[in-house]
Image: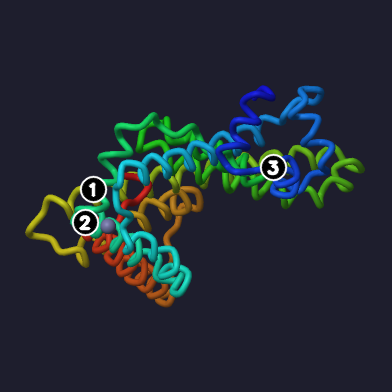
């Protein structure tokens, strides 16, 4: 972003130099240096200002074209804030509303004739790394995404936990090998479970969409059972044994039932049109 683009963005947003400084929480002489071109504007800040100015311009274009705003949409964030735990229901209501509301469709149709919005800036820090990683996994085949995401999450968790083992590793190099093996095992194990989850999830969604014979309850239970068998199989193979105690099988059965009911409720939401990430 050069100084000319920065001052254009400020004009669109109605910012004076001191407004810009207080909005970004920076000293005013820094904003002055950006506008004078004596200091480079950081990329994240440029993206943020460019995005906000484009949203403002789109708003003004809608206003100039006399397209009315949808009051239902304007009040939606307040309804979500009032009952944040019902996010699934709020999203389902939003999807249903946009499909049936003439005002929303007119806004969407008009917005489609305008130049597309520039990308919004990614969050900073760890959240930014996670956001970029998730955006990258979106480019992978659908079946591979849960495996890569779960593997990376557990691998990262193991690495963080092992930070406390650094003093020990410095004293005894053999600990380094153990830590590396634990990290690899966590990554591969979680990746394997993620892979199964991805396949089971897709099977459940497709079957519940196409089958009139099976209800969401039985599909959820079948999915939970498949997940449990596939997840437990490596342990049974490794230890050459199956749980013997009756209570162990009872606990496994209980786990399958609870997980199955959870899956069934997800599938019902899916059928109501709430978008899920792995579709
Ligand atoms: Zn509407």
> Badge 1 is on which residue?
105
Q: Are marks 2 and 1 in contact (CB under 8 Å)?
A: yes
Q: Tell me which residue sits at (41%, 42%) in the image.
A: 195
Callout 2 environment at 10 Å: few (<14), some (14 to 19), or many (20+)?
A: few
**Front residue of 55 and 154:** 55
Q: Earlier in the sequence, mark 3 or mark 2?
A: 3
Residue drawn at point x = 62 percent, y = 41 percent: 128
Does the closest atom of ligand 1 sit within 8 Å of the Cβ of label 2? yes
Quarter of the rendered structure image containing ligand 1: bottom left
Residue 172, image quadrant: top right
Quarter of the figure that contains the C terminus: top left
Q: Give how far across and how far down residue 48 sits, in percent.
A: 60, 38
Residue 146 image position (x, y, % from top left): 43, 44
- On the image, the x and y values in percent for residue 267 come to 26, 60
In front of the other: 180 or 199: 199
Give the x, y percent position of residue 115: 39, 29
Q: How is the image coloured?
A: rainbow
Quickly name the residue at label 3.
16
The mark lying in front, picked from 1 and 3, is: 3
Where on the picture, by quarter, is residue 64?
Answer: top left
Secondary structure under tag 2 reads loop
Q: Determine the secondary structure under disc 1.
A: helix
| Circle nearer the viewer, 3 or 2 | 3
Any mark on residue 101, and which? 2
* Mark 1–mark 3 distance (CA, rounded to whole Å): 36 Å
Residue 109 left/right relative to 50: left
Classify 14 as above or below 46.
Answer: below
Residue 75 vs residue 64, the one in the foreground: 64
The vertical placement of 53 against 100, above or below, is above
């Amino acid at each position: 972003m050069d100084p000319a683009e920065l001052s254009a963005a400020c004009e669109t947003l109605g910012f004076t130099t001191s407004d810009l400084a207080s909005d970004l929480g920076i000293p005013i002489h820094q904003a002055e240096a950006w506008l004078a071109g004596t200091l480079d504007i950081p990329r994240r800040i440029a993206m943020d200002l460019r995005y906000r100015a484009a949203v403002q311009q789109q708003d003004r274009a809608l206003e100039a074209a006399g397209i009315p705003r949808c009051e239902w949409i304007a009040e939606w964030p307040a309804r979500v804030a009032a009952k944040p735990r019902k996010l699934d229901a709020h999203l389902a209501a939003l999807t249903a509303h946009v499909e049936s509301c003439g005002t929303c469709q007119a806004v969407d149709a008009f917005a489609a004739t305008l130049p597309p919005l520039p990308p919004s800036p990614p969050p900073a820090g760890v959240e930014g790394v996670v956001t970029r990683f998730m955006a990258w996994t979106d480019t992978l085949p659908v079946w591979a995404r849960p495996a890569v995401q779960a593997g990376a999450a557990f691998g990262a968790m193991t690495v963080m936990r092992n930070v406390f083992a650094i003093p020990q590793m410095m004293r005894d190099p053999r600990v380094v090998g153990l830590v590396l093996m634990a990290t690899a095992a966590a990554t591969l194990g979680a990746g394997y479970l993620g892979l199964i989850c991805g396949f089971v999830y897709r099977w459940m969604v497709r079957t519940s969409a196409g089958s009139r014979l099976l209800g969401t309850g039985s599909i959820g239970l079948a999915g939970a059972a498949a997940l449990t068998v596939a997840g437990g199989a490596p342990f049974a193979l490794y230890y050459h044994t199956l749980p013997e105690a009756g209570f162990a099988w009872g606990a496994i059965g209980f786990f399958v039932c609870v997980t199955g009911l959870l899956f069934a409720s997800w599938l019902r939401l899916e059928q109501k049109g709430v978008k899920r990430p792995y579709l």
